Amino acid sequence: MKERDFINIIKNTLNSKYIGDDCAYLPEFGIVVTQDSLVEGVHFLREFATPYQIGFKSAAVNISDVCASGAEPKYLTSAISLPDDVDEGFIKEFYRGMKDGACGAEIVGGDITGADKIYISVTAIGSTAGRRIASRKNAKPGQKVVVSGNHGSSAAGLKLLLNGKDTNSNLIKSHLMPEVQFEFSKKIATVINEDYAMMDTSDGLMDALSAIADESGVMLEVDFDKIPHNKELEDFDNWKELVLFGGEDYGLVATADKAYGGTVIGSVKAGSGVKVNYKNSSIIYSKEDVEKNLFKHFKE
């Protein structure tokens, strides 16, 4: 079973109008809320990441969700479960990293328990004051497809680490300490005068494009050569696949009337799926095509 199948079951079981975007938007309170978890052995390995880097990424991935909604990150809480071999130094560096990765949001509480390995769950709250909040359902034909951040870097950085290439590569840094697209989110959410779609690329650029297309009932057509990426990627045999399907970059994809400081890579059209134009060819990816290429948390 796929992760999205689980999410649909939960959404339908709860009959909730709030589940579906990167954050739950609660207009009566003027906030958005999100929660993300990181598990040792799935999202990070202690042999590659310092406590500071683990803390930084734990905050950043949640702040990215708030930014994807268009809200201003304000508060974080963290629950962390730790094995016996973790000492006081780990805790100090972990929370120092969280503080630095929070983009100014304040860490206001949480919980600590014991476990067989490290489990981290962070809740983030964002303020909607003065912001127009995004939804994956808001893409409309005629809008531009805009991205912020590089794509494919984190997946390439992980490959380098797993292959023993422990260097100062910017690709490795992108994997261990992702750059949240805070300023782009702020600019578009405080200036735009129309409904817009926005989503982060935590599960890959194609995942975000496909989810927006599916939720909005449109086609997103993009030019591959316009997608921002680190030139180091081109040393990999499968670099184009990394750009499209590599996860954990935490860039942003939006559909809007103009760039708002991002990079325009295509446009929204009538139809369905995602059309990728290369120099001499084009490929149309259905929702099912995209899901087959994504990282799977659960075995099928």
Image (cartoon, rainbow, N blue to C red):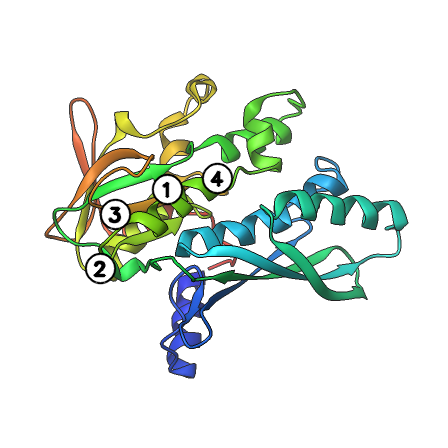
Residue that lies at the very extreme toward the front in this rendered image: 130
Disc 2 vs disc 1: Cβ atoms closer than 8 Å? no
Residue at image mark 1: 205
Disc 1 vs disc 4: Cβ atoms closer than 8 Å? yes
Residue nearest the viewer, comparing 232 with 26: 26
Q: Which mark is residue 216?
A: 2
Residue at image mark 4: 249
- The answer for how far apart the CA atoms under marks 4 and 3 are is 19 Å
In primary-sequence order, the first of circles 4 and 3 is 4
In primary-sequence order, the first of circles 1 and 4 is 1
Q: Dot 1: what SS?
A: helix
The answer to whether residue 42 is seen in the rendering is no
Label 4 sits on what residue type? Answer: Asp
Report whether 151 appears left or right of 164.
left
Residue at image mark 3: 255
Q: Dot 2: what SS?
A: helix
- The answer for how far apart the CA atoms under marks 2 and 1 are is 17 Å
Disc nearest the viewer among 1 and 3: 3
Residue 224: quarter of image? top left
In primary-sequence order, the first of circles 3 and 2 is 2
The answer to whether residue 198 is seen in the rendering is yes
| Image coords of residue 63 (percent x, y) | 54, 51
- The answer for how far apart the CA atoms under marks 3 and 2 are is 11 Å
Disc nearest the viewer among 4 and 3: 3
Residue nearest the viewer, comparing 177 with 232: 177
